Amino acid sequence: MTDDHSTDPGRNGAAPVVLVRSVQVAFGGLLALRGIDLDAAQGERLAILGPNGAGKTTLFNVIAGDITPTGGSVAIKGVDCTRLPSRRRPRLGVARTYQKARTFEGLTVADNIYLALAGHRRRHRVPWRTAADRALRAEAEGVAESVWLGDHIETDAGELAHGQKRQLELGMAIATEPDVLMLDEPASGLSRGEREHLVDLLEALPEKVTVLLIEHDMEVAFRIADRVVVMADGETVTAGTPEAVRSDPRVHEIYLGSEAETS
Amino acid sequence: MRTGSSMLNWRAASLALAVVVLAALPTVASAFFINFVMTQTLMMGLAAATIVFLAKYGGMVSLAQFLFFGVAGFMYGNAALEVGSRGLNLGLPPWTAVGFALIVTTVAAFLLGALASRTTGLYYLMLTMVYAVIGYFVFAQVTEISGPSGITSIERPDELAAPVSLYYTALALSVLAYIGFRALGRTAFGLALQGVRDDPVRMASLGFNVPLHRTLAFTLGGFVAGLGGLVNVWWNGQIDPASIGIGPTLVLLIIAVIGGVSYFEGAWLGAFVYVAMFTYLRDLPLVDRIGITEARFNTVIGVVVLLIMVLSPQGLAGIADRFRRRLSDRRRPVAETSDRSEGASHRAQSIDK
């Protein structure tokens, strides 16, 4: 497997943190992913672009373990985890957000982040409150503040505005100190000000964190990304630096063409 | 924060008041009211509280809770009796029999919970109903542990010989379960269970084992329902399969719904309304003249359930909660304005200085 990364070497030539090889996903007769390859090195900020239906979220689901691929393999930090259930992947340092923000609506902001921390520290089956709990709660409040939700610690997640839910999701993902952070359209539905917030947050992440970002907002994607992968119809069309991708005529054709179709 | 802590105080105060009143009740109320109405209320409430626990925290509506109530009773009967025509007649000392009954109930709850842990919603309801039906047939047909006419002449431990002691046992267990369930909601386990209720996929992506979490919650529910079942078998002195059939199973769900499925106190409130209706309906003047005979009590209860559901989908506890909120809403703006004016006068003073 390691021979392959000569085709797309990670930064500094190090072994890729995320290594996707020939992954196929079929939903009935529909091939959502047609043998896709993807590498991401440690600390790399990789944006995945593509029109609706390109298979970006499916690829995320495969890497996060929510979908088992029909073919191909996925390795994270050198561990083959093609068939590993999603609940075991956080131990490999994987954290993700969802296209439609998934928070625990009946719980407060603090509780949501607390749960992310508790899952990460494997304290989630303790049926009483301990001193460690209090430390975890304090930490959760700290994370809430770092995603600008300090004033909403006791607000139920279900009562948050759309942008705040995205901030909360990001907080829950960051709380687990991931090595691989996967963000599925984190800027969608955000106001201009909230987008600025988001970019600041992502830029403030520790350098060693690998970020995979699906984003329709080009401005956000190009500001964050070191490298851009463009997908269409379950395949990689092109990959390269933001500048190279921006000037690639194929990208314009695919992206703008199908954008025009959908609108 | 402020409303949270004031609500906590309000809850603690009303719980303390309720416990004091209930503990003192035997000195003023009739023996019939205590030993019949209230003991039954408390033990049914205890079982119904496990439905609330699973539904409120875990989003799992279980129809198997009355089964565990029954399993504990049957197992106690099997273990405690020395001689008798039916059952295992293990002849264990009473408190060992209690341990045996609770272990069997808990293990059964764990296994059945594990089997159901990958289903949700309507399927969970149906699967647990199947458990209840299977449980009924197991006890009705396996004569080694019961048979159709059940186990009779079951005696309670000597320590609980006085009828009122059963009332106090049921009260103590109810208070413990109420406080325990509420406290559990704030622990890592309880919060994770609520996370499983809100979004199991998200919980898995945070590293939680969702089916195991559901299973453990179901096991705890079964154990607590079993405690209620022990009080029931001591109170009744006998247990038969018909008493855990589909009818009583649905009654327990109705009790939880009357009280309000998202309120723990609702379980006991619902149980009281149900038991009181069944006990006192016949004593109402002229009630038989308008055609409400004993055979039609279920119809009356059905109408009452319907009325409560229409008036408040959150049950009786929901009505009480709404009333309390309205009261505190009426009080709050006044308090806030006075706060503000105090602050303003304070600022005015400091400017003066």
Image (cartoon, rainbow, N blue to C red):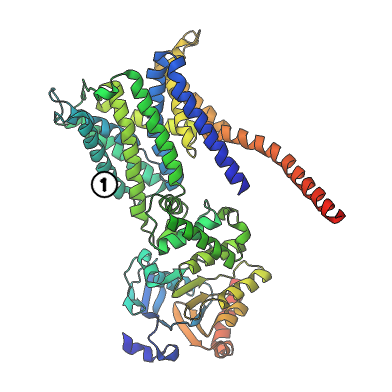
Q: Is residue B353 above or below residue B81?
A: below
Residue at position x 59%, y 76% in the image: A259
Q: Is residue B276 above or below residue A236?
A: above
Give residue B167's position: percent from left, percent from top. 37, 23
Give residue A261's position: percent from left, percent from top. 59, 74
Q: Quadrant of the N terminus of chain A?
A: bottom left
Q: Quadrant of the C terminus of chain A?
A: bottom right
**Is residue B64 in sight in this rendering?**
no
- Looking at the image, the residue that sits furthest to the right is B352
Secondary element under disc 1, as helix, strand or loop, is: helix
Give residue A159's position: percent from left, percent from top. 60, 53
For this rendering, which residue is in front, B231 or A18? B231
Give residue A91's position: percent from left, percent from top. 37, 69
**Is residue B106 in sight in this rendering?**
yes
Q: Is residue B80 left or right of residue B165?
A: left
Residue at position x 23%, y 36% in the image: B99
Q: Is residue B67 left or right of residue B299?
A: left
Subunit of label 1: B
Residue at position x 48%, y 34% in the image: B265
Residue type, label 1:
Leu
For this rendering, which residue is in front, B84 or B3? B3
Which of the 4 image quarters holds residue A37? bottom left
For this rendering, which residue is in front, B227 or B307? B227
Neighbourhood count class around disc 1 (C-alpha, 10 Å): few under 14, some 14–19, many 20 upward: some
Instruction: Name the residue beneath numbered marker 1.
Output: B111
Q: Is residue A101 above or below residue B66?
A: below
Residue at position x 68%, y 39% in the image: B329
